Image (spheres, rainbow, N blue to C red):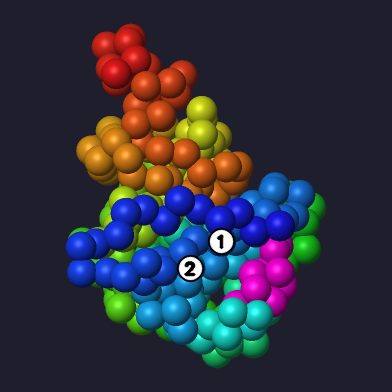
Amino acid sequence: MPVRGAAGRLRPSQEKGDEIEILTFAGGPFVQNTILVACDDGRTGLLVDPGAATPAALAAARDRKLDIAALLVTHAHVDHVDGVALAKAETSAPIHLHPLDRPIYDNVSEWATFFGVPCEQPPPPDADLVPGVNVAFGESEFEVVFAPGHAPGHVMFVSTSEPVAIVGDVIFRGSIGRTDLPSANYGVLMESIRSQVLTLPSETVLYPGHGPETTVGLERGTNPFLLHLNGGRGA
Ligand SMILES: [Zn+2]
Ligand SMILES: [Zn+2]
């Protein structure tokens, strides 16, 4: 079942309902979240990290008559891209990826074999995600924020109008992305969390690649992997 996220506060100029909506669909052996974003205009949709639950996310988009404008990939691990081929075939929407994750993306079928999961090799990306550059779809806009460590080209999508961020496998409720995989780096990940996640406003709702949503304030205060960033105390 999709989870209706707390999409944030209304801007003063907005009418009720005129805000982005985030729907999360978990699936596959890694219980990965495929995320459907309904943009401010109510007609444009985005798929973020099309994974095993892509069929359910596409069905929800059809139900809502959302036109999928883009396939956005936070990072190229197999569980985040194993639905890209299907999503591309059904929507023809352009695939956006940071170039530093291209080597993982291009070899994702080898990763799939390693993890023992099926994965159709996705078609090549259509556009590079550029950190600091905003991507705009249907009156909604997201800043592309570089947050490497779990993967070398990992990015997050931070709404420019509402306290909402789609964070992939950087941080989870009560946990952080794993760094025991090839091309992962614990120190780099912790610096990404310190400088790019914990600097967001406390009320920012974080939509991770696995598990339930959380907030910056909750993780700052209770995430056991981050306590040393606060001098050993919750903050
Ligand atoms: Zn990952
Ligand atoms: Zn993942």
- Is the CB–ligand 2 distance for label 2 below 8 Å? no
Above or below for 92 versus 144: below
Judge from the rendering whether residue 152 lies leftward or rightward of residue 201; answer left or right: right
Furthest residue in direction top, as rendered: 232
Residue 82 seen? no
Above or below for 191 versus 233: below
Measured Cα–Cα span from mark 1 to mark 2: 6 Å
Nearer to me, 188 or 159: 159
Q: Residues within 10 Å of mark 1 (few under 14, many from 20)?
A: many
- Confirm whether the magenta stretch covers residue 55: yes
- Is the CB–ligand 2 distance for label 1 below 8 Å? no
Residue 2 seen? yes
Q: Residues within 10 Å of mark 2 (few under 14, many from 20)?
A: many
Name the residue located 35 percent from the left edge and 27 percent from the top edge.
220
**Range of residues picked out in magenta:** 52-61
Going by the numbered disc 1, the residue's amino acid type is Leu
- Confirm whether the magenta stretch covers residue 156: no
Q: Which residue is mark 2?
A: 37
Judge from the rendering whether residue 142 lies leftward or rightward of residue 123; answer left or right: left
Q: Position of residue 99 (x, y in %)?
A: 37, 67
Name the residue located 36 percent from the left edge and 71 percent from the top edge.
18
Q: Are marks 1 and 2 in contact (CB under 8 Å)?
A: yes
Q: Which residue is mark 1?
A: 23
Q: Position of residue 64 (x, y in %)?
A: 59, 79
What is the secondary structure assignment of the residue under circle 2? strand
Q: Position of residue 173 (x, y in %)?
A: 51, 34
Nearer to me, 23 or 230: 23
Judge from the rendering whether residue 193 lies leftward or rightward of residue 222; answer left or right: left
Name the residue located 53 percent from the left edge and 82 percent from the top edge.
66
What is the secondary structure assignment of the residue under circle 1? strand
Above or below for 210 versus 33: above
